[in-house]
Image (cartoon, rainbow, N blue to C red):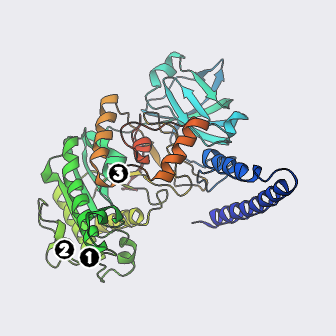
Amino acid sequence: MSARKQQLLKAHRRNKRMFLVAFLVALLVIGLLIAWWLVPLLLVLAWVAHEAWFADHLFYRPSDDYQYAFPADTARQAVSLSAGVVRLSEPLAAGETLVLELELKAGWLGRWLDPYVQVGDDRQDFERGVSGRRFLNLSGQAEALQQGSLTLRGRYCAAGTAGTLWVMASPDYSRQRVMVIAPHADDAELAAFGLYSRCEDVSIVTLTQGEIEAEDFQRLGLDQAAAARLKGRLRSWDSLAIPQWGGVPAERCVQLGYYCLQLPAMAAEPGKAFGSRESQESDVRSVRRHNPLALPADIDGQPTWQNLVGDLAKLLEHYRPEVLVTPHPELDPHSDHVASTQALLEAIALSNWKPKTFLMYANHLHDNDRWPMGPAGAGIALPPAIEPLPADRLWSPLLSADTQLDKAMALAMEHDLQGGQVFKRQLRRWIQQALAGRRWPVTGSNEFFRKAVRRHELFWVRDLSD
């Protein structure tokens, strides 16, 4: 976590303590001077208000501008917003990914209800109390833009009267040879189901078993280690079987069998083996029997960084991908995700095959655990970028309604995304639904059914020849 976020977190905790002290003093005064029965009532009301409006985790201020830069040769033009319509200042440049940079400012209701922008037939949500520069994803709206019929209206927020339209052109990467790198089972589906389900030549490589946090499996009468082993087997099976729902043949799905949250430690000591934290296993071959080819780590089964990099180099040479889909190392903070892309870069250096392009995704964020904000099926606005990121091009393909439903069903097959919410979290959802107007999809209760099943998928494009 950056120093800026540490400062914000420290200030948040300080303000929370001060508010709590003041609230308790006020309750004491009310109980002594007015009526004792008001004290428990006000405590319940305060808790309900917290759950409805103050339970989001934001490690930045809603008034912070998003900091995005794009490559110097990116086409851009000024646009104006007049009578709720986006008007171009010149003919639209060629390109399928359209990003509108503009200022948003929440109204008073936008501090209690999620502010959003209705743009054409799409909706994109933002933080409560938003007040600053934001980036709307207009991909798929080019025809309406060119015709001067694309409407844009803020709900619980107001948009500025002028903005900048960025237009980015990319090839259709689904027509190239693609390899998806998934640190865990489900990462490929969350980030790229829409992409890989229409690829003509794609392979999916999952790095870890996903065996940790297996408490739910202990209800079967298993101890912690046995539960972790069962969960690892199930999620490894998910990583091989679920891509077939998206049309990826079994011979193009590989499970490497390394252990969750151990990749950073492996990277720090490349020759040392790091077994599972919970399953008591230390041989990656336990989940490799369905792999379609032999890999270097099959020789000794040791969970070392050297073996991981060697496995990836062998897979690059076998499948010869032109495009690699991998976690964004600066935007996605999950330690296994960062280490996965690091291992991939080392494998490329070691391999005789050199891919051309990275398509990078973010399934997690440093700053905002609700992004993409808003309901399932809506578009994906650009995520918070409070600290500047590298100036990468974006590619944001559209998902049809049928593909979105198939993606939701793929997520429903993931063992780690199944089951209901714990009572406290479900109670929070009921409160937010009643008081804050939030909605969750019927396809599944896990938060990823809301966040990942969207009108767009979003990738940061990095040319590996640079």
Q: Residue furthest right?
A: 33
Per the model, the C-alpha gap separating discs 1 and 2 is 8 Å
- Residue at 38%, 49% (x, y): give it: 420
Front one among 39 and 51? 39
- How far across and down, in percent of the image, does residue 142 sit? 46, 25
| Residue 17 in the image: above or below residue 427 | below
Give the SS element for disc 2.
Answer: helix
Mark 1 belongs to which amino acid?
A: Pro
Residue 37: give x, y in percent of width and height.
75, 51
Q: Determine the image quadrant of residue 113.
A: top right
* Quadrant for the C terminus in the image: bottom left
Give the amino acid at mark 3.
Answer: Leu
Marks 3 and 2, how far apart at CA: 29 Å
Can residue 317 be seen from the camera position used here?
Answer: yes
Three-letter code for the amino acid on which mark 2 is drawn: Ala
Of badges 3 and 2, the one in the foreground is: 3
222 lies above or below 127: below
Callout 3: few (<14), some (14-19), or many (20+) C-alpha neighbours within 10 Å?
Answer: some
| Mark earlier in primary sequence (3, 1) | 1
Identify the mark at residue 303; answer none if there is no mark: 1
Q: Residue at x 20, y 76 (%)?
A: 283
Asked if the residues shown at circle 3 and circle 2 are in contact, with their CB atoms under 8 angstroms apart, the answer is: no
The residue at which mark 3 appears reads as 417
Closer to the N terminus: mark 3 or mark 2? 2
> In this figure, which residue is indicated by the disc labeled 2?
297
